[in-house]
Amino acid sequence: MAVKDSSEYCETLNYSFLLLVHIICADQQIHSQESRALRDLAQQAHINELTLQEMEKILGQDATHLSWEECARNVPVGQRSEVLKQILAIAYIDGYFSPLEREVVDQIATIWGIHGSEIQRMLEAAQGFGQWSSDTDDDEDSLSVGAKLLKGAESVLSRSLITKLAELAPENIGQRIERLQREILLAGPEYDEAIQKCASIAQEDYKYSHHALERSYNALRTLAGRLQESIYTIERTTTGQGKYKAAKEVSEKLEQTRRNLLGEILRDLENMREAIRAKKRALNYFSIAFLGKTKAGKSTLHAVVTGEGWESIGIGKQRTTRYNRVYEWKNIRIIDTPGIGAPGGKTDEEIAQSIIEEADVICYVVTDDSIQETEFEFLKALKGKTKPLIILLNIQYNLRDSRRLEHFLKNPDRWFALDGKNGISGHLNRIQRYAKQHYANDYLSIVPVMLLAAQLSSEPKHQQQSQRLFKASRIQDFLDSIRESIIDYGAIRRSQTLLGSTVGAIDMPYQWITGQASVYDNLATQLQEKHKDFSRKVQRAQQDHQENLQQKIRETFQIALNQVTPFAEEHWEAKEAHMSRAWNNLLKQNKFEERIHTSVEQACHAFQEEIQEALEEIGNELEILARLQSGNFKFTEQDSNFFDKDFIRITGVIMLALGVLGGLFFPPLALISIAGTAVGIISNFFKSKDEKRREAVNNITSVLQEQLNEHQAKVLQQSRKSFEKYCQSANDTIEAYFEELIQGIQAIASKLETAQHELNSSGNYLNRAYAKRIIDWATDRTEPLTDTAIAKTIRKVDREFGKSLNIRTTTAISLSKSLDEICTVLQERVTLHPTKH
């Protein structure tokens, strides 16, 4: 077909139809019946070839495909109301209006200038459709919703879509889909009985999972609110400027923690709640997901099992899957995911991970030509969900060459031999080693196959050798493992998905909170001990620096006393006023008063430095602010690298910020009065000059010494009281800071412990239900899952999530399965113990 220019392209594309294609892709899952329905719909609505080509680009997520925004803008204004109804109808085609679909619908409406209330009115008009997000949506109502949304529609596309809605309603899914290529996979009454049992168990288990997650979610929301209260409390821990300094620093760190709680843990739980809702639409299905690196053979495996998708597998295809492709038939879902590790494939990997929660069994595909440890790092995500794992080893050998094909068919078992030139034992050993390292145990099966041989068996060219190729591929071993998973283990696998795996969503925040509760509790205890040590250091510092201050004051006065006699001899004949001025000038020259105040300031400063050193020592030992510094509360040894500067910076301003460095202020030293001395000298007219000088010097000396001693006593007393007051002020302020900080930490620990108890209760609630399912399966017994039935059988469950499960029963249990089989199937170490009353 000739390439058309851009103007012709715009004129002939049916943008309304392309929007329907986009809405089907919005939930990142393309169901096989949906893609077939689109093509049928296109035929019925006479969609032109150019639009069909663009449809295939969208389904294949071709880099050049038109975005839904561009399609929306090109829909004629007069058609937008009906197209919106078409979009809503097809978005709800599987009975589930996902948030991703809702987001696209809302954005399309925004582009068209349609208010959200109009969408809600359309939904509510379709008999209760306004409750689209409820867990009680009824599938039968969903079909009528689509039909009523399009009631009275005039276009061929809308009338054709009503027909397709009837065909694609959940109760009809599978009835018009051709049977799987390999009938043996799902043949016989055993399968029908097993799948019905799976569906029944899933309905009961879903209620327990939903309830436990709601409780956990609410507990974490409550914790977030209580942490906010603690922030307000710590902001008020001090008075004055300190409120804006140290306490503010602490509250900011706690606010980071609160934001982390809301932004990460609650988001994770919300994602899990959304996953649980998504699981509801698949409660009647047993889901198997194919994961693995790009070009490992997942799409080939999907085509072999389902008989669909061969046309997308060919030479030069870098990746055949950009979304999770879902094949549903006879209550089984087979999901082909994008390749992990594809170029620019981070989004692909996220899409692949999105299906893990829904899958009951994960088939991880690896090839014998590239078994590296990096391939198995993804298994950590699976182990975090306790997902049963089958590893498919795809042995790659170019059978397209006729001579190689002939050589292969002569002795196909040679390619699966453990030893020899082409032995696979080395591959198996590496898989076991890497899987055990990243999956935490070796309870998994490895199935070697040759997918190319299975692919050739489906091609007309090799019709005569079809049976030999299929048998030689050993794909039947894998199909048998799927059948075994459904018939023998389907019920317990479903409980694993809905009960056992869901505990992981609770266990993660539980472990986080448990660790932080312990950290804060220990911090409070250690801080109390360090507080006592600090108080003793303050007392010693006060005593030492006060004694030192007193000594320096005495030394200063002694300097003045040493000047008395020389001064008296020099000024014995001076008049009183002149003598007083000379004496005070002498004191100023010797910086007498300045020396006193300098001694006081030095004592205060030395006391402050010693107190700050004590604070820094406490900080270095406890690393309080280092722990608060990491807003995500993931405490590691590296956090201490941030500590020193932060704690020093904050504690260094505690006393300044709290106003305790006002210093000591003494009144100026009084001028020493020598009144009466001169009078005494003048009255002795009959004495000699030497006698007069001696007597005057003695009198002046005596008066000055007496006044200096009196003043020294007053200064010593005043300095002692003022220094004690200064020290007490600093001590009281810091004591209050520590006391309220300890109380704040204790309050946080208490709130964390409350949330920890709530999460533990929710996790235990699910673990006990899961344990009851395990006991029923291990004893070949089936009964409804109720709280009464659980309490009657299960006494206690101790679980190290993803590793071990210790079940204590009320009575001794007679098992019909061995513990080895139980551990292998559940891929966890399980122990059973009856509890004595």
Image (cartoon, helix red, strand yellow):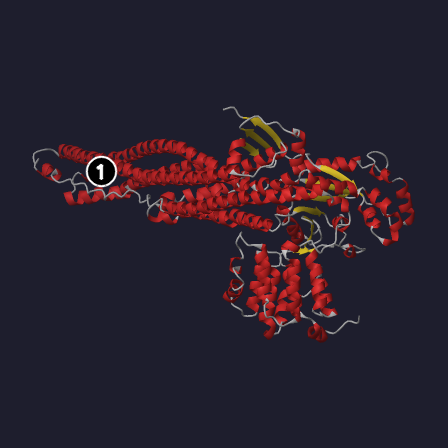
Q: Residue 818 at x, y = what percent? A: 66, 29
**Residue 483 appears in which quarter of the rendering?**
top right
| Whether residue 590 can be seen here | no
Farthest residue toward the front?
A: 189
Q: Amino acid under label 1?
A: Phe
Q: Is residue 403 left or right of residue 621?
A: right
Identify the residue at horizontal 82%, vertical 38% (top origin).
416
**Residue 227 appears in which quarter of the rendering?**
top left
Name the foreground residue: 6 vs 502: 502
| Whether residue 163 can be seen here | yes
Identify the residue at horizontal 38%, vertical 49% (top origin).
244
Q: Residue 368 at x, y = what percent? A: 79, 42
Q: Quadrant of the N terminus?
A: bottom right
Name the foreground residue: 87 vs 638: 87
Image: 387 above or below 316: above
Residue matched to label 1: 567
Q: In what element is the residue under mark 1? A: helix
